[in-house]
Every structure is written in C-alpha cells, then in structure tokens.
C-alpha cells in the first residue's frame, strides 16, 4: 500500500441543500467528495457550493484552499473575511458565524476531529 494519496475530488460524492434551520439567504447547494479518511478523525477531499449563506459552528479543525469562486466567513460579532481562488485559510474549533458564497466556489479541504 502506498503512503501517498492524491486529493482529486473524484471520491464518493454527496450533494445536498443547506439545512433550512441554518439558512441565512438564497438556496445554496453543496457537493462534497471524500478522497481520504483515517480513523474517523481526518478527512480530505473537495467541496463546492452555489451562491447563498448559512450559519456554521465548527467543533473540528479545517484547512481550506479555494480553487475557484469567492466566499466570506463572518464570525459572530466580528468582521467578514473574504477568500477567493488561490487563498488558503484555517478554521479553528469554536468558530461560529456565517459562511457566505458570493460566487460559486470550490475548495480542497482537510478536516481533523479531536
């Protein structure tokens, strides 16, 4: 077995609308692909979303690299941070606020649960 795994967005795919109880604006849909999973604690793949906004609350750690599009993360009581193609960022556990997709976006992600 190899110790290298390509993250291509070609793994198992899940498409769904944002849950109505979290919806802030629009009718965004998300698509997630899972290219890697280890010990139910680490996951990696690709994620995309259409335009809209929804509430988020993170219990996990996530690294994101934006491949296309534009989004804003607006922390509760804080200032919006905008990210676009080529940008990378980390979301720490405990972050809560609004995830807003301004232009349809795609990102690569690595998520870690403690």
Image (spheres, rainbow, N blue to C red):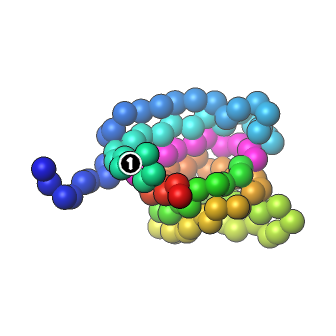
From this viewpoint, which residue is outermost toward the left? Answer: 1
Residue 47 forms part of the magenta stretch: yes
Q: Residue at x 71, y 52 (%)?
A: 57
Residue 69 sits in quarter: bottom right
Q: Which secondary structure lies at badge 1?
A: loop
Q: Is residue 112 visible?
A: yes
Q: Residue at x 75, y 57 (%)?
A: 96
Q: Within 10 Å of the Cα at label 1, are there few (<14), some (14-19), or many (20+) other Cα atoms? A: few
The residue where tag 1 is placed is 39
Residues rendered magenta in the picture: 43-55
Most common SS among magenta residues: strand
- 70 or 48, nearer to the observer: 48
Residue 12 to residue 3: above or below: above
Residue 104 to residue 29: above or below: below
Q: Is residue 112 left or right of residue 51?
A: left
Question: Residue 72: x and y, percent?
Answer: 69, 60
Residue 30 sits in quarter: top right
Q: Residue at x 43, y 53 (%)?
A: 42
């Amino acid at each position: 077995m190899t110790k290298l795994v390509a993250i291509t967005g070609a793994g198992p795919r899940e498409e769904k609308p944002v849950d109505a109880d979290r919806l802030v604006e629009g009718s965004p849909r998300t698509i997630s692909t899972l290219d890697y999973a280890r010990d139910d604690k680490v996951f990696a793949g690709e994620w995309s979303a259409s335009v809209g906004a929804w509430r988020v609350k993170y219990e996990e750690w996530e690294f994101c690299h934006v491949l296309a599009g534009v989004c804003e993360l607006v922390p509760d009581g804080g200032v919006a941070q905008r990210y676009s193609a080529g940008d990378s960022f980390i979301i720490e556990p405990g972050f809560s606020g609004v995830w807003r997709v301004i232009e349809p976006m795609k990102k690569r992600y690595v998520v870690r649960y403690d």
